[in-house]
Amino acid sequence: MKLIFALLVILPLAFPSEGSEISVTNGGRWGDWGEMVMCPHSYRALGFNLKVERSQRKGDDTALNGIGLLCQHTEHHNLNYTISSSEGGWGSWTTYQDCGSAYLVSFALRVEVFQGKGDDTAANNIQFSCSNGRVLSGDGMSWGGWGSWSGWCSKGICGIMTRVERPQGKGDDTALNDVKFRCC
Ligand SMILES: *[C@@H]1O[C@H](CO)[C@@H](O)[C@H](O)[C@H]1NC(C)=O
């Protein structure tokens, strides 16, 4: 009886169902959440790209500024559509990476912890795991460390929502801080 109860509690957490969200616990603390932006109906995410500001040397670094999802039609694989939620104003978009004939199911975030009087950048990079077990590592920056993996979307990822800090004027900018994905 206890085992059945434990499974009823644990399974939904391990395998979020349709419409649930996957997140990580090491996201940055600054900024506001943007809109949850979804792939079109019958599409799911098979790839991604990043908006990254490269090192500013003595200037104010922001590192990761945006995350784009490449959505593909589940039957007509020649049809694709790109989406993103809030993004920062710095950096440029990298080229897309994708899972080939598989799709995105889980992610981990590389985040720099609070630097005190130093230059904060918050989120730096992301990696995704594909439904075929392959891991795609983003072409972001390397400050901070990787956190643990999010939950798992068994039917894939269909939506994205990012937390981005607005420009701080003469203050320390961090741009993208955290991200969540909606399961298909
Ligand atoms: C989207 O689909 C078109 C047509 O199949 C293809 O040429 C293009 O490379 C795809 N875009 C990406 C980013 O994969």
Image (tube, rainbow, N blue to C red):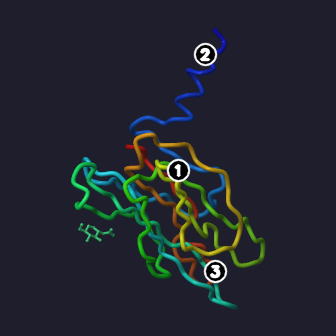
Q: Are marks 3 and 1 in contact (CB under 8 Å)?
A: no
Residue 108, percent from left and from top? 59, 56
In the image, 175 versus 143, the foreground residue is: 143
Left or right: residue 113 versus residue 152 is right
Left or right: residue 28 versus residue 38 is right
Task: Say if 162 sits above or below 44 in the image.
Answer: below
* Quadrant assignment, res 171: bottom right
Q: Mark 2 points at which residue?
A: 5
Q: Residue at x 61, y 70 (%)?
A: 124
| Mark 1: amino acid | Gly
Dot label at residue 133: 1
Q: Name the residue under label 3.
A: 171
User: Nearer the N terminus, badge 2 or badge 3?
Assistant: 2
The answer as to whether callout 2 falls within 8 Å of ligand 1 is no
Q: Quadrant of the N terminus?
A: top right
| Crowdedness near tag 3: few (<14), some (14–19) or many (≥20) residues, C-alpha within 10 Å | few
Q: Marks 3/1: CA distance?
A: 41 Å
Q: Quadrant of ligand 1?
A: bottom left
